Image (tube, rainbow, N blue to C red):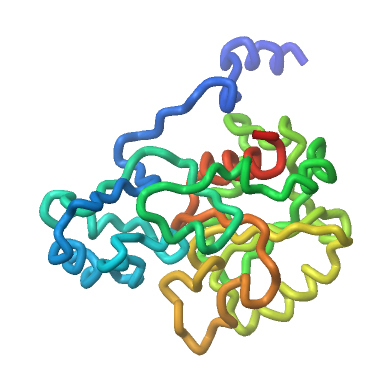
Amino acid sequence: MLKIIKNRMEQGYKTSTYPKDPIVLYHRFRGIPEINQECSTEIAEQCANICPQNAINAVTKTIDLGRCTFCGHCETVNDGAFVRFSENFDLGAANRADLVTDGSLPNLAEHSKHHFKKLFGRSLQLRQVSAAGCNSCEADTNVLNTPFFDLSRFGIDFVASPRHADGIHVTGPISNNMKKALMDTYDAVPSPKIVIASGCCSISGGPFFGSEEIAGDLNSLIPVDLYIPGCPPHPLTTLHALLSFFKRTQ
């Protein structure tokens, strides 16, 4: 016991004060894109042509964050004349269409389903389903359980059984081999339940979009309540989305 007390005194308080205090991420982090609507269509087309995800529409000058892997190739064209990525990690959305953005996203707290706040406001239990993911999204989600983020202090936990869950948190491109396991897990969660699509793979298929080996994006299988884009989503992106959608009233 004395050793534990000694270690505690030496290490100090490790948990982040977020969301009470803002966090500024490292300058290389790629968050919400800042799109220059005055940019020429020519340059926008160059960006669209090199985008490996076909996430850029040069005509409307928008980026589909549900497809984007935030690789940053478009930012290198003409020294970022069309797009630059900000350090803003507030990327969550309640509607798939909102992820096709011209550089702004609706306030997630205002667009969330408020009855979820009443049902799960004090406690939210999630079953994580890796539907053939590469483990990047899963690893960055697992980081939320470390002392720095301490997800449990907000009343949010990942549980082992879908029978004990309020919803599922899905990552990965949903391979054909994982489709049944995913649907069985979804069916095992008691109603009312919520569905979270995390990472571009579950939202759109990601790099595997169009492959015969995947069952399609999550929303084509079951209704999605919350989208968290990224490849993988930063732990703060996930945390902010969960708090905004399920905890905050505005």
Q: Nearer the viewer, residue 38 or 90?
A: 38
Q: Position of residue 140 (x, y in %)?
A: 53, 49
Q: Residue at (19%, 51%) from the top-left corner?
A: 38
Please provide percent x and percent y for residue 246: 71, 42
Q: Is residue 241 above or below residue 70?
A: above
Q: Quadrant of the N terminus?
A: top right
Q: Left of 146 or right of it: where is 73?
A: left
Q: Nearer the viewer, residue 149 or 31?
A: 31
Give the residue drawn at x 56%, y 79%. 216
Quadrant of the rendered structure where residue 102 is? bottom left
The reply, left or right, for residue 32 in relation to residue 109 is left
Image spot of residue 238 (x, y percent): 57, 46
Task: Tell me if 164 is positioned left or right of 51 in this view.
Answer: right
Report the label total: 0
Which residue ends up furthest to the bottom in the rendered image?
A: 212
Front in this rendered view, residue 248 or 233 = 248
Residue 145 in view here: no
Position of 138 compared to 101: left or right?
right
| Residue 238 is at least partly visible in this image | yes
- Horizontal and vertical percent for residue 155? 77, 36
> Residue 248, located in which quarter of the rendered image?
top right
From the image, which quarter does the C terminus lie in?
A: top right
Task: Please tell me which residue is depicted at 35% across the width and 42% down the height of the picture.
Answer: 29
Residue drawn where x is 62% and y is 71% of the image: 219
Q: Is residue 176 above or below residue 15?
A: below
Q: Is residue 5 above or below residue 231?
A: above
